[in-house]
Image (cartoon, rainbow, N blue to C red):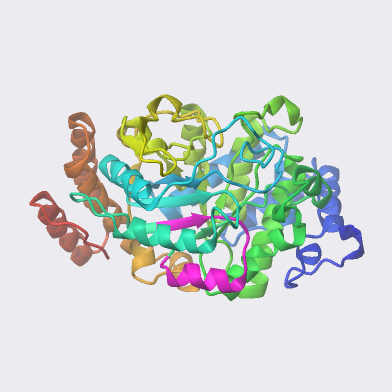
Amino acid sequence: MGNYRHVFNPASGIAGEFINDREILETVSYAMEHSRDRALMESIIAKAEECRGLTHREAAVLMECSEPDLLDRIYSLARRIKKKLYGNRIVLFAPLYLSDWCINGCIYCPYHAKNRHIPRRKLSQDEIRAEVTALQDMGHKRLAIEAGEDPVHNPIEYILESIGTIYGTHHRNGTIRRVNVNIAATTAENYRRLKDAGIGTYILFQETYNRKNYEKLHPSGPKSDYAWHTEAMDRAMQGGIDDVGIGVLFGLNTWRYDLVGLLMHAEHLEARFGIGPHTISVPRICPADDIDTGDFPDAVPDDIFCRIVAILRLAVPYTGMIISTRESEKVRAKVLELGISQISGGSRTSVGGYADSRGQQHGDCGTGHVTDRGEDADSTAQFDISDRRSLDEVVGWLLDLGHIPSFCTACYREGRTGDRFMSLVKRGKIADCCQPNALMTLMEYLYDYASPLTKEKGLAAIRKELKNIPGDKVRELTAGHLEEIRNGRRDFRF
């Protein structure tokens, strides 16, 4: 049964109604028909200038723009909105892969159940501590945990225990202060348990919103149920998680269809729960163990990808946007200007990849036999990494580009989540917290982990940015906390 039988209703809890196939196709058709309607495009750009966001149909129209001067205005506006709402701050995080055991048949992912090429691996709690220690020694404070869907190897109890282990691992000045979770769709009760465990954002990518293609791409396993997967964010919010992150894997389907679907999903969450997604991720299909991108004819070229990021920033101005190390340094530099507010750095996409890359020793399958897994650290990688620089190199690069690398987790820890967070953002008040917190967490990184060159760059940037904090009292408090960090104290926040 296709979505054609459903009526479009953004506030509905039924997947086929809030992600409506007919509405998407009509939107794509409308946008292409109006690709030369300059007056319409100018009116949409004018609306976007007010930071009120755009509908999925308005965004689709702008994606079809071919007038060079209007395209320049679109990109310029995306840069201005990004600067206005996020300043020059870029939040850093790392993924942590717990297990590659999976019972799904997703044909674009090397973790699929029929893949016999990769050695299946699940981290013990001791191995998780080793991974977290390695990440802390890099300087990370924010993680996104990942695991395949397997109720035997990766039950919710394992995920909850792992979260406790991560938060409970402290090494020197290292602490993980926010654990975001990217695991398979589950029940409202399990989402409540994740909330109680203190997670930050629950993240789940739709992969593609085209139901027909979705079912072809997911021929077996629990993930093959389109409605169950698509309605997961509703259950998460019903379970008390008010920060959720959505995304698609661009290239699995046509970008026109999935961009519209992505924005419809954001509109649905706003219509039904009064709060849209906390973040939107924009990964692109890329090579992996037995995955060839040549098998996906809808792969998105760089110019269209950059335009997607810019249009998303206009359409959902108050939503954070994430890009991973799938993308090259060159592409990441471009999209940072256009709308991206969070990036990963020094990432490993294999199970145990952080400790393994340091040549640490691991027990093998509980037998007591100790082996060096350094040589096959990438053998369980979910996808190939384009940006292989260390976290320190990424931090230095961001500073060279004029950005302020931020390791801030204060909003989550101060309860500024969901509608409270969005209210502060929309009133322009969140920067009163974000800029000082970014500078203080950067100072921690510089004194605890940075190379001498990165430290020199970072301290110069902090001196410059401190002067730009508008409130005298906040600026004075920040300066005092920065001095205390220099003298060995940690974890100040506004």
Residue at x 86% of width, y 44% of height: 33
Residue at x 22% of width, y 37% of height: 450
122 relative position to 164: left or right: right
Residue at x 39% of width, y 65% of height: 412
Q: Give the image location of residue 195, x and y in percent.
A: 47, 70
Q: Looking at the image, which is closer to me, 76 or 351? A: 351
Residue 8 is drawn in which quadrant? bottom right
Classify the position of the C terminus by image quarter. Answer: bottom left
Residue 95 is drawn in which quadrant? top left
| Residue 312 visible in the picture | yes
Please report the bounds of the magenta region as a residue range: 179-198
Q: Give the image location of residue 256, x and y in percent.
A: 75, 43
| Residue 467 visible in the picture | no
Classify the position of the N terminus by image quarter. Answer: bottom right
26 relative position to 439: left or right: right
Residue at x 40% of width, y 70% of height: 416
130 relative position to 320: left or right: left
165 relative position to 348: left or right: left
Q: In this view, does 390 lie above or below 366?
A: above
Is 235 colored magenta in this rendering?
A: no
Q: Looking at the image, which is closer to me, 256 or 157? A: 157
Q: Give the image location of residue 196, x and y in percent.
A: 44, 72
Is 185 colored magenta in this rendering?
A: yes
Residue lying furthest left: 487
Q: Give the image location of residue 247, x and y in percent.
A: 61, 51
Query: How many marks on residues?
Result: 0
